[in-house]
Amino acid sequence: MEIKSPAFKENARIALHDVNLQKALGNLKAGFPVKRSTAVARMPEFDQLRDEGTALKNHILENLDIYLEQFEANVIKNGGHVHWCRTPDDACKKILEICKEVDAKTVTKGKSMVSEEINLNDYLEKNGVEPIETDLGEYILQLRGDHPSHIIAPAIHLNLEDVSEIFHEKHNRPKSSDPAVLMQEAREMLREKFAGADVGITGANFLVAETGSTIIVTNEGNGDLTQTLPKTHIVVTSIEKVVPTLEDMTLFLRLLARSATGQEFTVYNTLSTGPRRAEDQDGPENFHVVLVDNGRSEMVGTEFQDMLRCIRCSACMNHCPVYGAVGGHSYGWVYPGPMGSVLTPQMVGIENAGLLPNASTFCGKCESVCPVRIPLPKLMRHWREDEFAKHLSPKAVRWGIGGWAFFAKRPALYRLLAVSSNLFLRLMAGKKGRIKKIPMAGGWTDWRDMPAPSGKTFMSQYKSRKQS
Amino acid sequence: MSKAEILGNIRRGLKRGEASEEQKQAVLNRINQHARNLIPQRSQLSHAGQIELFIAMATEAAAELFQLNSITEVPQICATWLKDHHIDTLVTASDEAILGLDWDSAAELTCVQRVAQVGDSASLTTSFAGIAETGTLMLHSGKDSPTTLNFLPDNHFVILNRSDIVGPYEDAWQKLRDKTQGELPRTVNMITGPSRSADIEQTLQMGAHGPKDLIILLIND
Amino acid sequence: MLASEKPIQVGLFVTCLVDMFRPSIGFATIKLLENAGCNVTVPEAQTCCGQPAFNSGDKKTTQDIARQTITAFDGFEYVVGPSGSCIGMLHQYVDLFDDTDPWKARAEDLRNRAFEITSFLVDVIDFDSMLASYEGNVTYHDSCAGLRELGVKQQPRKLLANVANLSLTEMEDAETCCGFGGTFCVKYPEISNRMVENKSANVQVSGATTLLGGDLGCLLNMAGKLKRQGHKIETRHIVEVLAGMTDEPAIGDSAYELGQPA
């Protein structure tokens, strides 16, 4: 996928003026946060579960190599295959190779953000394999040639009319604006695709080291049809998803559903453990796990290690006022919102994605809802430090900070600067309490007045009061 | 090679080489203990309380639920429900409990035992456990229970014995390990209500790709 | 406070915005602290808490300013400021130094002594006998750093409950960021503007005639928006109300425009 993160500001400007997008984003605000808070209120132990989940993820990361090898050994024991892929390219090639082995023409796909990350669909298409997205949101996007703008609600940027139009165009059926009818249409269209696919590709929410199982969590049941009907099931996933046991997986399932959609439990939580057994009547004959790294292993032991705790629930973006204002596409790559602002620079380079970790007021709402307590603002700040250290931050910022710091580190000079700035602003305001336009400060005064100082600086007034 | 590089990176980050035997053993021990994390109070009830909670939570998740005094009532209730929905064929699993049912009372209904196919309207399976905490059914694959029956038909009837209801998920895992000597079946399905999606304008619609109706037949065994 | 007790020695962290834009907040803070039996000193060597550098990724400058601030407030029993954001920054100095650095221990010591004003009054010295009166229906914006870094939520409300004649109406999304974010508001002005527009709308819907908050940065942002939109709603820092010092025009208003003698 083309990286459009360097155009974040321009993307955001367009998004803010996109009436349809703003309408769609309104649905998000009224939905997920309210549902999450209701679900959390019904689970008095929720914060304790968060603490345990955080500690458990930390334990896993400290032993990540051991758990991954244990997981691999158990997949193989069950008759499956594990493929380790450092780069998106490695992963795409391996997946294509598996598809070619079984002479695949079409593959059905369950929702997978890792597959977006490695840009799998484009690669398969270019190489003669047709990928068919089966998650309703992803299906709508594929018909439109669009990409997800949210990690669990991929089509959140669209309105009913958009879906209605594209279905009418692609399905060759009468136009309907009834969501129930549209969903039924997608159901019917995809039925034969499920049955006719040669390979089913899903992601995984967790990998269980104890049993060599992968688990997917879905509400639609598309993932289950994707992985049960074709002869070959490929799980494309990433290395940080391993957990020790079924009990440990359960802890995260309790956190995930409530943090994500605010459900008590997602409708389908499905474990896959190897290919079909000799006595089974259905299920895939081949089971492959493609373990993608793509920069994750390099985060271990760094200030970004905490990010590897992420369970992809989307609570951070659902509660983020910046995401809520500009939507996911503005971020310009696969992962939007606060978690994306930390992950994207790791995966596409800080030189391409520096605007993302800067696009935060550090309001801390994301961290306050994160089920595994990732200090997202702190991690975004680490990227800013990295950017500053590499001299990538804009000159205006560097000079501004440099000039300000010169005074801030010298209290006596700072007093003089404060007194003169204070006087300047008061003169500008005249008899009014505020200023309509300040040269060089258009970022502020284009949108709001600048309240004028109400008198001399505190320090000068305090001094004269003490003297008198 | 990718594997070596990935593991190498991780180990470099952890400031160590390959883990010592001791470290590996510690991880294995942790796995083998199957230690439970915090289990919410909600499901820690008497068995009667767990049954009540299961019914409430499953119903909240939009499952239909019928309480039957005996498994012998299954054919009749299926037949009535299917007749109301103008469905004349039921695809069933082939476990003993189902094979033992007497379908004479449901003469208009055609019952077949096979895997599910596109176009099937209804299926009937048993379940391994009911989890009270969230009204969740646990089913698993096996020679008598094809997985496609759980997902492909439009309507899914599930037989659940009251005695198979447990409180938290953890009890179901233990029950499963006890049954299968620790070897997991190819697939384990935890199902909580019928299929749904909110992908169109965040408005919940029931019946996306999986069953549109999930009908739990709770047997007083 | 009992007369026999020695007064509590408090160093006032003025904050650079209060120094520059609204000294009355500093004086109101002093008045509240003195009413509560504290002896307040304003160290000369303070400037800014260092957030502009910290949030721009300039760690070295932040460390320099942290050391300067730590030194300036050596010896005070408590360090109190009228801002959750700046006091929150003082708490974060701890993360700037390695464990082996002697400044780390000094930063920890400062963190243990540094409090936002409403939290100090309620949580530390349990002082709530406000003698103030304020005629009006107010709403309270929870500034992010105070709320999430320092746990300031009930304290301002508890204190406001003791102000005579004041009624508080909570607005929708009181805990949602106003879009100020320090340098954020000039780096991403359009996004910041959308956030403050949302805030302004919520303030208006609440029906309040006065908007209160505990951080001048956010208050300048919100007052600036309300004024630009032509609203009559007054914006003030909570300490002005608590100290009964509301004679001065509200933020962004002027005596001249209000027809008062300057």
Image: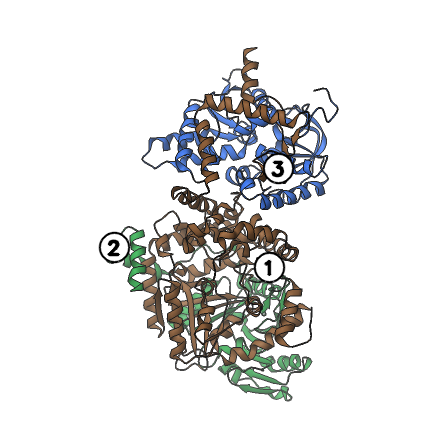
Chain colours: A brown, B green, C blue
Give a yes or no on whether discs 1 and 2 share a subunit: no
Distance between mark 1 and mark 2 Cα atoms: 46 Å
Residue that extends furthest to the right in the rendered view of this protein: C259
Comparing labels 3 and 2, the label whose residue is closer to the camera: 3
- The chain to which mark 3 is attached is A
Residue hosting label 3: A445
Residue hosting label 1: A157
Q: Residue C19: which quarter of the image?
A: top right
Residue C55 visible in the displayed image: no
Q: Could you tell me the amino acid type at mark 1?
A: His
**Which residue sits at x=66%, y=77%?**
A173
Q: Could you tell me the amino acid type at mark 2?
A: Gly
Residue hosting label 2: B17
Residue A48 at what x, y percent from top left? Answer: 48, 50
Image position of C142 (left or right of A344): right
Residue C55 lies, with reference to residue A410, above or below; the image says below
Residue B152 at what x, y percent from top left? Answer: 55, 77
